[in-house]
Image: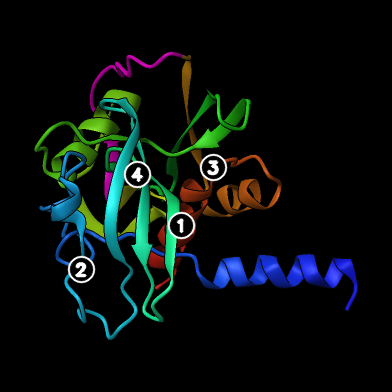
Amino acid sequence: MSRRDDIIGAYRRRLALAPMPLPPDIMPPSPTQPPSFHESPEDRAAPAGAIGDHIWQVQAERLLVERRPWLRLSEQDVLLPDGRVIEGFLVAEAPSYVIIFAVTAEGHIVTIEEYKHGPRRVAVHLPAGFLEADEDPLLAAQRELREETGYEASRWQPLGVFCEDGNRGLGWGHYYLALDAHHATTADPGDLSEIRTVLLTPSALRQAVYDGRVAVADIVACIMLGLDALAR
């Protein structure tokens, strides 16, 4: 076996061992009960056998970085179902957030253009933002849509709740479809960069994804879920 095959094999084994951190009750968070950013390691540990024998058991956790409310980084010693112990597995936590796929009565999607420091460029984005402490996700979605774009919507539907990073955790994203969106007030995003609201047709937004003008993965996911919901 070549050195290249050894490297590829090791990489695939690492992928096969990648965990997906779950909230304490082992179920995806409900729209009204997002997982807490401030849970203790004992609270986050999953009960044995909750999903077959696949849950990794956290034996110890050491805090590395605490930058509330934005990031908590720790390393865990975890017991695998086959008895192996992985030491120093990195886990990152961040606040839960909302993303809104808002559609006007004319069928246009409310998008924004703004600089994002992750991809280091201006990108097509959807209205989105972190939940405040103990905030209901739906109320947070309505607030973020209004603050970032000045739009409000009369009908709301959840599109799903998803873990940001299947390996390290981070936050949980609450995706929403907002129908009959209309401009109601002056936008007041309060962000670090300028935001420009842009109305796009579904086909134009889909093309923006394929052209690479949407730079953030969870925004792409919400866009595709929203487009699929519109097509049903």
- Dot 3 or dot 4: first in sequence order is 4
Residue occupying the point 19% across, 55% down: 44
Q: Nearer the viewer, mark 3 or mark 4?
A: 3
Please say which color scheme the image uses. rainbow
The residue nearer to you, when weighing 169 against 149, is 169
Q: Amino acid at mark 3?
A: Val
SS at mark 4?
A: strand
| Earlier-in-chain disc, 4 versus 1 | 4
Q: Which residue is labeled 3 in the image?
A: 216
Instruction: Report the residue marked by disc 1.
Output: 167
Alpha-carbon distance for marks 2 and 4?
A: 20 Å
> From what the image shows, is residue 78 above or below residue 60?
below
Label annotation for residue 99: 4
How far is disc 4 from disc 1 in space, using C-alphas? Answer: 21 Å
Contact flag, marks 2 and 4 (Cβ < 8 Å):
no
- In three-dimensional space, the C-alpha distance between marks 3 and 4, rounded to whole angstroms, equals 12 Å
User: Would you name the residue on which mark 2 appears?
Assistant: 27
Taking the image as drawn, is residue 208 in sight? Answer: yes
What amino acid is labelled 2 in the image?
Met
Q: Where does the C terminus fall, quadrant-wise?
A: bottom left
Is 131 covered by the magenta stretch? no
Amino acid type at image mark 4: Ile
**Residue at horizontal 20%, vertical 50%?**
41
Residue appearing at x 32%, y 49% in the figure: 173
Q: Where are the magenta residues, as a range?
A: 177-192
